[in-house]
Amino acid sequence: MGDDLVKRNQAEHKLVSDLFFKFNLSYKFTSAILGKDTEVPEFRFVFSKTRNDKPVPDVVVEARVRPVKPQDGQDDGKKRYTILFEGQKYERTLTVDPENVAGDELNEALINKIHEQKIAVRRMGLP
């Protein structure tokens, strides 16, 4: 059972990472599985903007992503995830059709807002 669970979570991680790549975000990102052998895996995404003259980003934006199990009768082929960005109080639901990714399923403006806030805090010299 343990190996099957790890393999299932690794497959889910690959799927969600591939979906995020298809969103064509202006951010680069890395992702990792947090707890490979848990029934509901959690994935950590770290978004950053780098430039040629400065390959190490000033700030990064972190998000935690978890798959949502479909409810009975809800098998429409779409994948649903909860996503919680750092500093935010509420999770958001992300719904994606893996066969037809439009690219606008994730609101990049939210990542931009958090990124801008972190840069402003850094300029003020706060931790």
Image (cartoon, grey):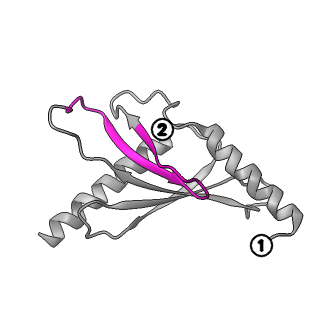
In which quadrant will I find the N terminus? Answer: bottom left
Q: Amino acid at mark 1?
A: Pro
Q: Can you name the residue that lies furthest to the front here?
A: 89
Residue type, mark 2 in image? Lys
Q: Classify mark 2: helix, strand or loop.
A: helix
Give the camera-side residue of 35 and 102.
35
Looking at the image, tell me whether mark 1 or mark 2 is earlier in sequence order: 2
**Could you tell whether 69 is left or right of 31 in the image?**
left
Bounds of the magenta segment:
74-94
Which residue lies at the image location 28% right of the left edge and 59% below the top edge? 40
- Mark nearer the viewer, 1 or 2: 1
Q: Quadrant of residue 35?
A: bottom left
Q: Is residue 38 left or right of residue 126?
A: left
The answer to which quarter of the image holds residue 70 is: top left
Horizontal side of 56 relative to 106 (left or right) equals: right
For the point 24% across and 46% down, which residue is it?
Answer: 69
Q: Is residue 44 above or below residue 84?
A: below
Residue 38 on the magenta segment: no
Residue 27, x across and y down, in percent: 63, 47
Mark identifier at residue 127: 1
Q: CA distance from mark 1 to mark 2?
A: 34 Å
Q: Is residue 53 visible?
A: no
Q: What label does residue 22 carry, if any?
A: 2
Residue 45, given in percent of the width and then of the height, sits at: 51, 57
Residue 37 visible in this rendered orientation of the protein: yes
Residue at 24% from the left image edge and 67% from the top image edge: 6
Query: What percent of the width, then of the height, locates residue 71?
Result: 20, 39
